[in-house]
Image: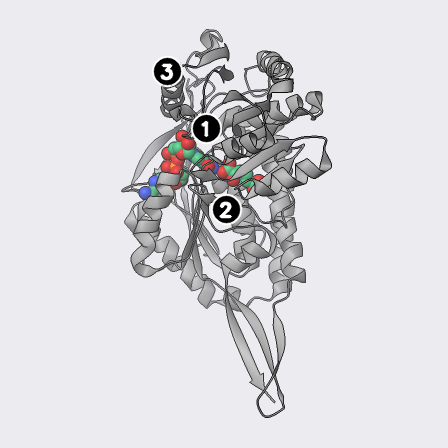
Amino acid sequence: MTSSPAELQNFVAGSFVEGTATFENTNPVDGSLVSLIHEADRGIVDAAVVGARAALNGPWGSSTVAERAALLRRIADGIESRFDEFVTAEVADTGKPLALAEQMDVTRALVNFRTFADIISTAGTESFLTDTAGGGTALNYAVRKPLGVVAIIVPWNLPLLLLTWKVAPALACGNAVVVKPSEDTPSTATLLAEVIRDAGAASGVYNVVHGFGGNSAGQFLTEHPGINGVTFTGASATGSTIMRTVAPRLLPVSFELGGKNAALVFDDCDVERAVEGLTRSVFTNTGQVCLCTERVYIQRGVYKEVVAGLVEKAKGLRLGRPGAEGTTTGPLISDKHRVKVQGAFATALTEGAEVLVGGGVPDLGADLAGGSWIEPTLWAGLDNSASVMRDEIFGPVAGLVPFDTEEEGIHLANDTDYGLAASVWSSNIDRAHRVARRMEVGISWVNTWYLRDLRSPFGGSGLSGIGREGGQHSLNFYTELTNVCVAS
Ligand SMILES: NC(=O)C1=CN([C@@H]2O[C@H](COP(=O)(O)OP(=O)(O)OC[C@H]3O[C@@H](n4cnc5c(N)ncnc54)[C@H](O)[C@@H]3O)[C@@H](O)[C@H]2O)C=CC1
Ligand SMILES: O=C(O)/C=C/C=C(\O)C(=O)O
């Protein structure tokens, strides 16, 4: 006897509602069916936006900071109490290693809520005492108001982490949100709806609409006249499409887009530490993090040693089922994405790449033959003229390139249309500061990678995005400021 698959519905104005059609959510580990997803049509998206507006017009619209901070803490507690369910759901959608989902995705989700509960509780705004012409003073002070109904559109690589990175500050600031998770990873956003409802949020504060991008829920949401802003993480081209959609209404946008991130490894680095950090930065989450390194520039004195170390580490990665003993690396998110990554592998060969390790699809046996597996891959022999060194691949792959002088290394790292993240590996403190500051990116790490303080600015420039989120920067996006000037 076979059981019917689970069905995930949209969450609109406090209720779960069916869609007008369903689509399949499959597990990239082996291609098995995870669930059927109810797709939102224009009517359902409209009901979600109307529900969000109604919440803003109700008691939620006049909630105090203390009430909102308390709600965020209850949501974090709710995630914590259902931690294993979130991990299971995230792993089923993405195929990522269980330990990664536990230590990174779900842990960070509850930290996102707790951090923004703290930040909103202690946030101030500017005030100025202004001398007036008559010899008196005026008091200028700014007050924050919610932006309104915020559309939140997120991708599949870190589904819950990236969703809550936006939902937490949005709710902290008193907004109501309509979220559109990726069609490939709809589960944890839906589970979060239960947690937010059970934490006591008013109906309409958090809504979920499922579906695809163009001509589906994503487009219907960004086209809706009732939204007041869009925050989006995903492909640069999609950011551009969304920007065009909202341009006639001049809506504020916050975009965290792709990367073609460089690492600069200097002769004076701690080689063991650098190899360890670079391995994480290239291969974490099968290279599917916008911050992952795809270009590694290595000063000639340590080139051979670093390359040998990276190749050895790549060979040591273990592809396998998420919960299997020793698994370090999961599949890519989908066959569609694997086609893109394989395309880059083929292009690299025509562009002169020497494959140091990987370069193909692994044979993991019949059990995993239906999954979207790809080999961790390293290339030598390429320079910045190769398209695979310029375009984001978003897979477990990097090109390794030697350089001679500091100036040359900086030039190579900055020679890109993206501007998200960089890492600098050096034991010379002066050089480390000097070079890190010259990286034309939003986030420049020294002797580490993906070490986050959620109060610090996060985002990129160029094709990597518009604006910064994190700490005060999130508050700035999710609120409108009114300056009050009181003459005395
Ligand atoms: N964080 C990042 O930097 C990410 C980058 N990517 C890059 O994007 C490439 C394509 O991946 P996709 O899954 O197709 O990313 P995508 O940017 O198309 O999808 C991200 C989200 O945007 C939605 N979306 C797509 N088109 C839309 C539209 N016209 N209006 C409103 N919403 C829309 C999707 O349904 C999904 O929820 C990847 O190969 C990778 O290079 C993908 C995911 C995350
Ligand atoms: O740590 C974060 O806040 C975000 C990390 C990664 C992304 O934004 C991404 O992969 O898109």
In the image: residue 433, left or right of residue 155: right
Q: What residue is shown at x 55% (from left), y 25% (from top)?
A: 297
Q: Where is residue 392? Give x, y as percent.
A: 43, 30
Q: Which residue is mark 3?
A: 346
Location of the C terminus (image quadrant): bottom right
Instruction: Name the one closer to the observer, 33 or 16.
Output: 33
Residues at circles 2 and 1 in contact by the CB criterion of under 8 Å: no
Q: Residues within 10 Å of mark 2 (few under 14, many from 20)?
A: many
The alpha-carbon separation of the residues under discs 2 and 1 comes to 29 Å
Residue 434 occupies which quadrant of the picture?
A: top right
* Between marks 3 and 1 in the image, the one whose residue lies nearer the viewer: 3
The alpha-carbon separation of the residues under discs 3 and 1 comes to 15 Å
Q: Amino acid at mark 2?
A: Ala
Q: What residue is shown at x 72% (from left), y 37% (from top)?
A: 429
Label 1 secondary element: loop
Q: Amino acid at mark 3?
A: Ala
In the image: residue 178, left or right of residue 429: left
Q: What residue is shown at x 53% (from left), y 29% (from top)?
A: 293
Q: Residues within 10 Å of mark 1 (few under 14, many from 20)?
A: many
Q: What residue is shown at x 34% (from left), y 47% (from top)?
A: 242
Q: Which residue is mark 1?
A: 394
Instruction: Name the one closer to the observer, 37 or 262.
Output: 262
* Between marks 2 and 1 in the image, the one whose residue lies nearer the viewer: 1
Q: Considering only order in the chain, which callout, 1 or 2, is on the residue closer to the N terminus? A: 2
